[in-house]
Amino acid sequence: MNAETDAAELLDRVRAQREAVLLAQREVEALRVPGSSPYHEVTVTVLGTGEVAEVEFGPGVVESADAITLGSLVRSAVNDGVRQLKEASRQRFQEVLDASRQLL
Amino acid sequence: MIELPSSNAMDAADPAGGPGALLPSILTGSGERIARHANALFGTAARLSDLYDEFGVGKQRLDTQWSGRTAEQAGAQLADSLAELHRITGEIEHGAALLTVAGTLVTAAQDAYRQVVAETNPVVAELLAGPVSRPAAVTLAELAGNALAAHFGALQGLLTTIEADAAGLSRDGSGEAGDERGD
């Protein structure tokens, strides 16, 4: 073992890991994840940046539901979208961790 | 006292405690002090080696100017002592060489910690501060922490080998491993 060479290799490895993590983060931020209320009365699109890009109401939903119900459906759809985004993010970073473990 | 960069963000993000959890394994040694000690030992070995040469010259003079049974006995005793001095000098040199390697390894571990943390901690801190980048921060902190731990593990393995080698030296030099003189 050469301490200097190994330290250089360690730094190279950590830098490569950092690039892999930042790439994964950019990929996650580019995601567009759908979310919906339990019976799909409301669907949303959540961006990887955490912003809600779109909210869509199913046919007749706005006419038939009161404001409180509509609010509840939107909240439910947004929470579903955020949950799906978190899961997609978790899976993407798990791939980074697994790939790193295979290299060790 | 060695100066190391803060690893606070990595420590906060890494479930295993981050580089901060590894600090005790690299803070207990000073590579520079170990190197100074090794150099002092090399100096001692060099002085003993000079002494060995001087005694050798003295013995040669005695051999040419003193004869008889008593001279032979004294000459043999002196030769034994010179051989022992030579062996001890060699052990000191070997011990000093081991110490030099150990000092290099300790310094290497501290340098590796310093560089990895200095480059990684600010990135982890920035990712932690983002509204949706906490998983990235946790992943990066965990990866860097694992890489450092593996690196330190390899260095620790070498230090353990050196320690065993040095322990063998002190055992051999203590006379416990068989007394051939058998008085």
Image (cartoon, coloured by chain):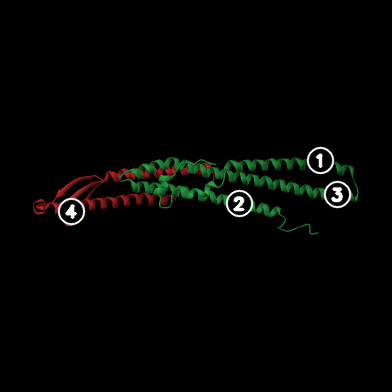
Q: Which chain can be seen in red?
A: A
Between B102 and A78, the one lying in front of the other is: A78
Q: Quick one: SS at disc 4?
A: helix
The quadrant of the picture occupied by the N terminus of chain B is: top right
Residue labelled with disc 4: A72
Three-letter amino acid code of the residue under disc 4 = Ser
Q: Which chain can be seen in green?
A: B
Three-letter amino acid code of the residue under disc 2 = Glu
Q: Residue at x 91, y 49 (%)?
A: B68
Residue B47 lies, in percent from the top left, at: 73, 40
Q: Quick one: SS at disc 2?
A: helix
Three-letter amino acid code of the residue under disc 3 = Ala
Tag 1 subunit: B
Residue labelled with disc 1: B57
Q: Nearer the viewer, mark 1 or mark 4?
A: 4
Q: Quick one: SS at disc 1?
A: helix
Three-letter amino acid code of the residue under disc 1 = Val
- Dot placed on the residue nearer the N-terminal end, 2 or 3: 3
Q: CA distance from mark 2 to mark 4?
A: 67 Å
Residue labelled with disc 2: B163
Q: CA distance from mark 2 to mark 3?
A: 39 Å
